[in-house]
Amino acid sequence: MEYIECMKTGYNPAHVQVACDGNFIGLPLTRTVVGVWNLSDPSAQPLKLEGHRKILTSLVLGNKPDPKRLCSAAEDYIIVWNIHQALEKAEKGEQIKGVIIGTTLGYIQHCAFSPDDSLVAACNNNDVLILRSNTSEVIAALEGHLNRVTCAEFCPHYSSTLVTISEDRTFKVWNIADLSLVYQSTIITASPFISMSMNLHVPQVAIGTADGIVRVYDLSDGKDFRCVHQINIGKIMDKYRQSKEQSLLSPTSQKNGPVTISSKPSYQRRGDNGEPREEVNVQDVAETGCAVLGLYFSWVPEDDRGSSARSVGFLQRANTMIRDLFSASPMLVIGTTGALLQINAKTMEVIQYYDLQDPVPSNSESKEMYINNAGSTYFSQGDDPEKIYCVIGSHFQNHVHLLKWDHATSRSKPCSFSTSLEDLSSISSELPGNQNQQSLTVLSSEPMLPNSILKQGLVPKQKEDSTTKIQKGYISPGKPGQGVKDQPLTFQSKIKSSGYTEAPRTTMFKPKTSSTKQSSAVKKKPSTGLLENALDKEYPTNPGPPKDFVCGWFVAERPTPINAISYSGDGLSLACALANKSAQVFRIPYKEKGSYSLAHNHIVNDVRWSCDSSWLVSACDDKTVRLWQRGQTEAVLTIATKLHNLAEGDGPKKDKENAQFPKEIKNAQFYYMDRFLILTSSNTLYMYKYHLDPTKQDIKRYVSKSKYKQVQSFTMDAQYITALSAVNDFYSYIVMCAGSSKSLEVYDMNVGKCVRTIADIHTRPVHCIKQHEGSKFVSHPRDAYDLFLTSAAGDCIKLWDLRANRCVRRYEGHLNRSYPCGVDLSPCGKYVVTGAEDKCVYVYDIRGGTYCSKLTGFTDTVSAVAFHPLHSQLMTASLDGKLKLFTDSPKVLSGIKEPETLKQR
């Protein structure tokens, strides 16, 4: 932040609209005279524009650079001036005249030019007047607001669209070409609307209120003017204030040495040198208001937006998708009475924060300047897009402060309020991925370390018979008692029947004379679930959002909450984690005969399939993890203790260290191409190697031959782990965990430690992490797998880029306040789907911030969603135990009938 100039005005500038476009600034030089300064030399004499007889109420500059127009409004006239022509006449000493476009129209509190500067919208109390900028003609008067209209702006993307806001807490959208009202909102908030700004890159409008809330609405056709984002500026300022108080009171901000605690008054306390000690009073951190006085969407040059895009190949089919997703984002600049903020317009993260009570370094003088409080704020950009001009009107004095602020980029690190006090006044823009930060990627090119834990494997030791022991010299062949003992004849091996009890063959050969003629084609074997024909199948290249209902069914006889669902890798099975102490597996396409149940002792929290779709792992509230073979209803392996189950005998020996898990197991899955198992209990991440043997002894069938052993455990700095994610379809070192501390930790299993921690990833603990791993039927380049989603109840969904360590998108609009609703990313990478508590499913385009499709017809909260790995289909699960299938093309599945169980209910 740099202080440029203090400009005097004829009266208090907090009650007049100030004009600034980055090249010129227009202020009321006196009560009736307009002064125009060139920002390239603000200390020079201004251009004086005289023509009004009453006090000026509004000033605004045009949008076109040539000719540059300025509109000044008072109760007597509304005049449009040509700045370039006025400068030429001023140099020649000629009289400067403007075009009067309105006479005695009343008190005009705000004016705005249309994108082509042909129209002027003038806010007159409760009405808005539309005037031509070159003639004295009033085209229309827009009425309907019940209180004073505070702002009106034309949309740069739709030149005939005008948005007006009022103190009646509503906004209206007008079509000037048709002279009609397009949209009228309801009363949205308890505080009046006082500021507004249009986004120059996408059709969006930001509206600020007096209580510190900024809402962003979508003006695109067919989006119903939805609220895309909402951010509470008051909470951000409170967070900064608390961080500043902690920095003032922390021992690190004081000198080294013993701390003196004195009960004397402050004027009697002395320091070490005998002089009065400077006291740090927390009350000095004054509480300023959070009213949003000014808003501005910055613009990013086209070259910068294109250069920052990363070449993600799975999005190359769409021309602008990759450019929109990874391009540089504009900043939403917000001015309040006590602070200035720069917020990423796509992710709503605070990039820069400046407290107006902090000193501002001056450009011309060595001393520092103080602003304290703002009465009005205006922002603009000139020819240099790296700088933002800030015009701050004083609350109690007749002057404005002109500041220059560095324009942050979307690749800048978000503002952290836990830094030192010196860093809080101005947060520098530091690019992620520099030398101080380790670069991470899901598909790492680094070789496996010699001592990596990923090299471990569990191979059970084979028992040696007496012949092998004699050959190795373990026992001598002549000792008594070392011979082979008698073994039962009917248990350890199968004895083939001699065939005496079978009926004798009476017919040696009998030709088939009644068989029908078959095709010469060779009959294919049924699929074994190992993707034999995966090369012949491919996920649709450009699917639409799933919106057509196909079929649905209940998972149990009674309504049972479904906690999680998971498709197998081949897409032939669907597993459901239920709250009725069971897990249900269905055949896909759905058939009632192909389903079976897996019994547990408590609520099942999670189910995941192995990479080859042959095994299923389930996590349960009874502090156990079970592994199941596909098609079998008896668990092959049960993980009930923390260390291993390698003890000899009928059961595991008692070991104090090998105790049960401390808390319920919420997450479990296969990892590293099925070589390991990872699970979470309490605040610990456990990693196991295992060996599965589904065979059973004929006598001791309760004894499992499957073994497991702990490889390593990782403890997270939180009370409990809330979400777990790792890629299993290919080799990856990365494992992600989210905890109750609202932070996310990234573990590199090749190194065997946590390599990155993202603090305050959401306002509440994350309940779901979804990495983009696609499926076996679609291929992506390596950069695409660095994307992952996080979701938190009471917050939004965020799309992150692991390599750049930043949030690239934010998805809002669905209702999720308390229950952990599931989130999924389509295999093609185009859509983000989430359940909601309003009994709907929301489908978001990965490039945009608002949903493109909304699925209705549910009877309870949608708790889980999952995309099919091969077809463009979406499976949804709700708390009433109902599964529903949706697709983008109903013709493909026109033959699927709705199950009878669903029809009966």
Image (cartoon, rainbow, N blue to C red):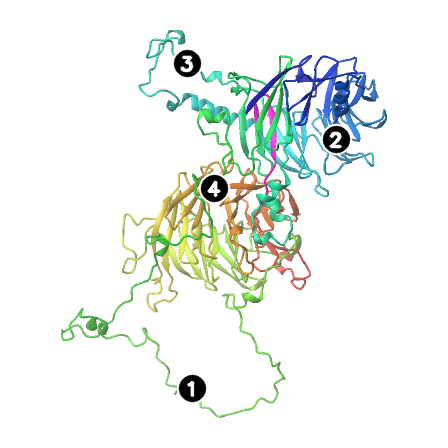
Residue 248 appears at what percent x and percent y? 43, 21
Residue 206 in the figure: left or right of residue 597: right
Which amino acid, mark 3? Glu
Residue bounds of the magenta highlight: 326-340
In the foreground, 524 or 360? 360
Say which of marks 3 and 2 sits in front. 2
Q: Which residue is mark 4?
A: 433
Residue 304 appears at what percent x and percent y? 60, 40
First along the sequence among labels 2 and 4: 2
First along the sequence among labels 2 and 1: 2
> In the rendered image of this protein, does residue 233 appear above or below residue 738?
above
Q: Which residue is mark 3?
A: 279
Magenta stretch holds residue 336: yes
In the foreground, 438 or 566? 438
State the image quarter where residue 135 is shown: top right
**SS type, badge 4:** loop
Which amino acid, mark 1? Glu
Mark 1–mark 3 distance (CA, rounded to whole Å)? 105 Å
Mark 2–mark 4 distance (CA, rounded to whole Å)? 42 Å
State the image quarter where residue 23 is shown: top right
